Image (cartoon, rainbow, N blue to C red):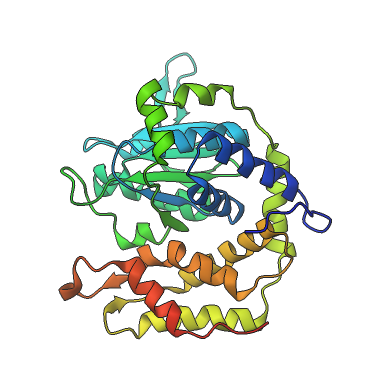
Amino acid sequence: MNLERNTQNLPRRDELLAVLETLTGALTGKGRTIRLCVTALLAGGNILLEDIPGLGKTTLALALSRVLGLTFGRIQCTSDLLPADITGLSIFNRDDNRFTFIRGPLFNNLLLVDEINRAMPKSQSALLEAMEERKVTVEGITYDLPSPFLVVATQNPVEQVGTHPLPESQLDRFLICTGIGYPPEEMEKKIIRHGSIRGELEQLSPVISLDALREAQQAVRERVFLSEKVTEYLFRIVAATRSHPLISCGLSTRAGINLAEAARANAYLEGREYVIPEDVKELATPVGAHRLIVGADQDGLDKEQLLRSILREIPVPLV
């Protein structure tokens, strides 16, 4: 990918490229996942990291918070996790003779929801309003969440003991779903020899301010153009999933909106003020595959491979 520095018309792009360079230097071999995380943040979405335990999902979230200068909250999901453990709760203050709301870990810029599918569905659903509207309602009072706000959730494969599949409504709230993969051979040997690299992350410092990050998000929304021709290509992808014989429920309108937002963020990182079909094609699988619902007799079907096959059948327009 071309990451040449040219930010004349795209404010703060240099600083976002510095974020990518710093993170890829600290977490060797995680470049694609890091870029997808930054894409989700720029597009105002959330990211779901699905992989087996012990591959550095938590380490990645910690590194993101440090390099981006974000406040960090963490929820370790267990079967006895309660919604109040996420949002916070009111405690009676005898001195003031009134209830005081104690904010939970949800009230941070970056919220790591570790092993989200080990929580019961009721606790999982406590995140829905926050992930979609950047607000949370507790005991009839609505609170705004900090800006920017990013949920980085990790999920173990559903075959593992003690996991609860995420409902479709919650999966649809994740802009991007991706794996993290094993580190490169030499890096893995180094980690095995010297132990976790999490201690090295203590040396990371912010390379972008919150105001600059908000300005970059605004630039993605307002300065990156999506043409009618590219919109038509995007819609054809969405529509094709709805008529595919192996798919019982295709991509929703929200998925189409999210794909457009992610494509804009990708174009911004590439230094363009306009989206091209390749932006859409590149992001279609991480944005769309986890949202597909296949037929009951297709259990175990690889959704990513299925969506890639659909993409191959749709001609890429010339722009």
Q: Pick whichever, 176 or 142, lies toward us.
A: 176
Q: Is residue 230 left or right of residue 81?
A: right
In the displayed structure, 64 sits above or below 137; it is: above
* Residue 292 point in image, percent of width and height: 34, 70
Q: Is residue 87 visible?
A: no
**Residue at point 18%, 51% (across, down):** 159
**Residue at point 52%, 54% (across, down):** 45
Residue farthest to the right?
Answer: 8
**Residue at point 27%, 78% (across, down):** 248
Residue farthest to the front?
Answer: 186
Q: Is residue 256 visible?
A: yes
**Residue at point 47%, 21% (across, down):** 199
User: In which quarter of the view is residue 270 placed?
Assistant: bottom right
Residue farthest to the top?
Answer: 95
Q: Pick whichever, 166 or 224, lies toward us.
A: 224
* Residue 175 point in image, percent of width and height: 47, 58
Q: Is residue 181 left or right of residue 109?
A: left
In the displayed structure, 12 sits above or below 228; it is: above
Q: Quadrant of the C terminus?
A: bottom right
In the displayed structure, 216 sits above or below 98; it is: below
Q: Is residue 86 left or right of residue 167?
A: right
* Residue 308 point in image, percent of width and height: 40, 73
Q: Is residue 148 left or right of residue 95?
A: right
User: In which quarter of the view is residue 99 placed?
Assistant: top left
Q: Quadrant of the N terminus?
A: bottom right
* Residue 119 point in image, percent of width and height: 26, 42
